[in-house]
Structure formats: structure tokens, C-alpha cells
Image (spheres, coloured by chain):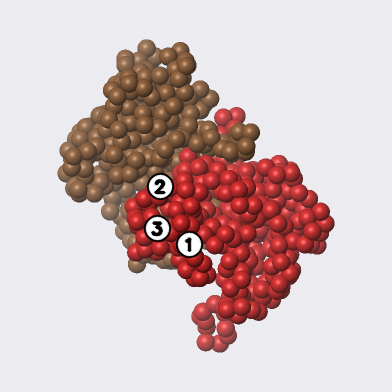
Chain colours: A red, B brown
Amino acid sequence: MVEPTPSTATAAQPGPAPHRGEPIYTVRGLTCRFRQPRVSLRRPTPPLTAIEGIDLDVHAGQRFGVVGESGSGKSTLLRCLAALQAPTSGSIRFRGQELAGRRDRELKFLRREVQLVFQDPMASLDPRMRVRDLIAEPLVAQRMGGVDERVGELLDAVGLARQSATRYPHQFSGGQRQRIAIARALAVRPTVLLADEPVSALDVSVRAQILNLLAELVERYDLTLVFVSHDLAVVRHVCDAVAVMRAGAVVESGSAERVSSAPQHPYTRALVAAVPTLRRALAGADPAALLGAAPTDEEPT
Amino acid sequence: MGAVSARPDPPPAVLDVAGLSVRTGDHALVEDVSFHLGAGERVGLIGESGSGKSLTALAIMGLLPDELSASGHIRLREVERDLLSASETERSTLRGDRLGMVFQEPMTALNPLMRVGAQVAEVLRIHGAVSGREAATDRARDLLAAVELPDPERIARRYPHQLSGGQRQRVMLAMALANGPDLLICDEPTTALDVTVQAQMLKLIDDGVAARDSALLFISHDLAVVATVCDRILVMYGGRIVEAGPTRALLTRPRHPYTEGLMAASDLEAVDAAGRLPTIAGSVPPDGRFPDGCVFRNRCPRGDDACQAWPGWTGEQHDGVACWYPSGSGREAGRG
């Protein structure tokens, strides 16, 4: 773990973090709405607000966690950061450059700097492509040379045998597929890695291996990591700062250590209480104890 | 397996599995699995993907795919026939009545073309728990209310795709518990759910089996979830049960190196000086090609020549280990 950082994003006011200089990402008032199919002839269905009024800063070298449940808007936020989703309003600045409102071909510089790893590698890797081509595809897209050598290097870096290059994704286990996805993401030597629930589909022992690999690669390549997860315990392990999202808004943020050990917002407290832990189970907690502070929809967000 | 117990007789078993093996052609996916479940007992089955947990559950339910063959014995209380030799007709009268199951993915387990209320009512009518359409509909609504679905009247008229994942899983639980089964099997029932929804679901399972005095077989790879719900734990790897014991004892003094490895990898707060998590070396071999002898020996820090032979079971059926060098035996010294 890196030294605890002060709050870098707050629900109400954006928190400055002067010691790190200009942040890599500066997000202000980010709002994303989606049109919904019409179900009535009389009036249109109101749009779905996925995220609303998000302010946050991500600094160079930071490991920034985003925690929330299904539908909290965490994946939409990540897609906006990757400029895969255009926001309805608000601003996302990447190293000072505004991303909102840009066209796809004006975002090519971003594709070299920012790469993504998704939850389910079986869905994110094309089943008909060999591992070599999967890892080389971003290099080809960016017209970068030395492809074969780079693919070999990357396979070494993620702990796969070089012979894996000629095989197809279905010939690998879940953990190995996630390694392929990570190698693909690192191919163009990005400075920022966005990870959307990268270990949620994995067994505990494989999860530990992938978390170790991510930590090692982030250190070795000096990456800035934005890590989205529903699991605060995983985020606490991986990240130094965290933002807790609920219903499209950030309800609490601060150092990962502080948020998980002394959560302030009732929703964060409920989230912490609802995760079963070995420690509490062995102390005699039963399933009812997990509901101690279960949130209700009436609670303020 | 199963040395004679010195303790007073345990309550008569609801389910007794003895020497269960599941094979595909030339090799075994599940081998010599034996355990029993008493009324009201909550037993967890843990292990990584590919360790044979779900196949064991499917064998008990009589839902194994045709290309797999099962041998051994599965006895259910008050059922004359061995479940493995019973005909499909006999087994189908038990499923949904005496045996209930909740699957991991409710979207594929529920019928997408049928309203969920009708699916719950169908379970009741098929097994003759109620007669008449109206009585079944009423009872189904009560069952949906019992799993704390809001406005059960309205939910009953919905199709599965109109419900959230947590709501669908509640419907599954309502169906599984509808006829007060002797045994409820839950196969990773909360893996696809959010943590707060998971907490509610775990409580409903806990309350549901307690109210009916059903035995519970709870399958999960999440040790903390199993420890929260279960009284006893069976650890499975490579198609075999490698360790069994009461929850607290097993998790505070694990004996099998695989159990120790799983526990170490689960604890996100235990890291080494470089901030790395402990892992189990290697990975589960693909296609169930585990080594002969001890199935864990190619990943085990204590493995040596002795491990080329299967170590056999030490201890009682519900509290023992299958390892040549279990922790706490003195034999593991200098290894691992």
C-alpha cells in the first residue's frame, strides 16, 4: 500500500490534493442519462440517470477505487473516463484536455494512454482470435511496430508461457484469460489502467494471483489505476483512495483505509456490515447479523 | 472411510452419501465421496471451480447430464430405493418435494415464458400439496411473501426477466422451499448478487431451513459466506473430500494444506512485506486431469513420494482429513 492520501473526491465539494500537482483526471459535474424505450403513446419514458453531478480527481500514480452495487453507476463512470460513453453534461479533463464533446477520431491519443480490463474475459476476448492476435490488436490499431517481440514480452510479464500465443481463449482457465486481457491492455504501454470488476468472476485463490499480478504491473510500469468493484475489501487491498457510489452519486470518499475502517455515510456502513468475513463468522455472527444496518431505499443518498 | 464413532449416535441422517463417484468415460470427476446430513444441519461444501462440488449436488438431485455415470449410494430418509438406482419417475416425485435446489443463475433456472407465481404454484400442484388452481395461487403468493418479496400479489404476475437478480433468486428459494423439503441444496446461491442483497438472501435461506427443520447443503467458494451460514464444512478438491469438520474448528485449525491455502488466499488483510497476497501454487488442472494418488500433490508445499498414493481418510466421516502430512499431526514438520 502507498501512503494514505487525503480525500480526493467528495460528494459535496471537490477536494483539492495539492501535493500531487495537476491530476490526470479532473471530473466535474459529470452527468450521464440514457433514453429509455417508449412504453406509452401519451408521453415519453423519462430518461434513466446513470450518474449525476460527479466530481473527482485522480492523480498520477494513484490507485483509485470505485465501490458500489449493481446500478450505482460505477461502470458508466468508468466508460466515461475511457471516453467510450459521451456524458450528457459536465466535464472530464484528461491531463488538462477536455474529453466531453470530442469526436472518436479526436480521441486517438487517449487510446494510447488509457486501457481497460473487464470483468468477464470470456466475453471481452474474441473467441475466434489467437492470443497473439488478441494482444497485438491494439498495437496494430496504433500502428506500432515490433509486434511479435512485444507480445512475447507481455506474455512473460503476465506470467503466461510464450507458446500460449498460438492458442485460443477457450483453451485457458478464467484466471489465465484475465492475464491475456491484462497483457492486451498493457500492449500500447498505457499510463492509466481502468479495471472494471477484474476479479469478481474468479475463485479466491485465482483472485489472489490476479490481484498480485495487477499490483506488480502497476508498480513496474508506474501505472495509474482506476479499479471498480462491488467489494470494498478488495478495493481496500488494492487502492489507496476510494469513492463509494450509490444511485449515480458519490456518497463518500477518502483514503481506502479510512473509508473501510471508519465509514461515515450510513450506506458505506451498511456495505461494510453486509460483507461476511471469516473473523466475524468465527466470532459467532449469523446471517441475521449481516443485516444489522441494511439500507432501505428511503435513506438519504 | 468413517471410523466407528465413540460419541452417542448422531440423529438419523436425512441424507447419506456413501462412496459416490461420477465418471466420464475413462476418468473420475468425483471419487469416493461420503458424507451425511442430519435434520436441521447446515453443511457447507467449499472448493475451487472444477473441484466437483456442483457435480456432487447434481448427482444427489438426479440431474447429472447423460454422458456422466454415477456409482455408489445416495440414501434419503424414508425412501426405500437408493437414489442412484431409482428410476427417473421415482426421482421426479422426490425433486421439488423432498429435495429442493437453488441454482447460481436464476435466469436460466426459471422458465422465461411463465409468470413466476404460476411457477411456484406448479411445484405445489405437481406434488399434490394443494388441490385446485385457486388454492395453489393463494399458497404461492404466501410463499413469495415469506421470502420477503414486496407486493407478492403483483410480483406473482411478473415474468422472470421483469425481476431483479435478487428477486429472481428469492422466487427460486420460494419454489425450493414450497413443499418443505427434507434437504435443500444451494449451489452458489449468492455469487451473482450484490453484498447487501446477498446478506438478505443468506438470512432467508437460514430462516427457511430452520422453520422446516430441513438439512442444508450449501455450496460456495466463499469461505466467509459458508462460515456465516454453516455448522459443518466439507472441503472438496479434485473430486474428493479432502477435509471435513465443524466450522469453527476447521477454520481455526485447518489440517489439509489445501484448506490452509484457501484460507490464506481469502484473507485480503494478510499480506507479505511487498504487499502481496499468499496464493496456492499452480492452478486447477484443466478437464479434471488431477494427479493420481493425492489429488493435491502437484500444488502442495508438503508433497513428496508418499503422496503418490492416496492417503486415505483419517478421523471420523464428519471430522477428518485425507493427507499424509496434516497440520497438527507432527508429521508435517519440516515440510511446507
Q: Position of residue B310 (x, y in %)?
A: 29, 24
Please state, as top left, top right, bottom left or bottom right, where the C terminus of chain A lies in the image: bottom right
Of pointers 1 and 2, the one earlier in the residue sequence: 1
User: In whole angstroms, how far apart are the C-alphas of marks 3 and 2?
Assistant: 11 Å
Choose between B34 and B118: the one closer to the eye. B34
Chain on which label 2 sits: A
Same chain for mark 3 and mark 2? The answer is yes
SS under mark 3: helix
Between residues B58 and B81, which one lies in front from this camera angle? Answer: B58
Task: Indicate which disc residue A131 carries.
Answer: 3
Q: CA distance from mark 1 to mark 2?
A: 19 Å
- Residue carrying label 1: A146
Vertical relation: B67 (above or below) A139: above
Name the residue carrying label 2: A161
Amino acid residing under circle 3: Val
Residue A273 shown left or right of residue B156 in the figure: right
Do marks 1 and 3 share a subunit? yes
Inter-mark Cα distance, 1 to 3: 16 Å
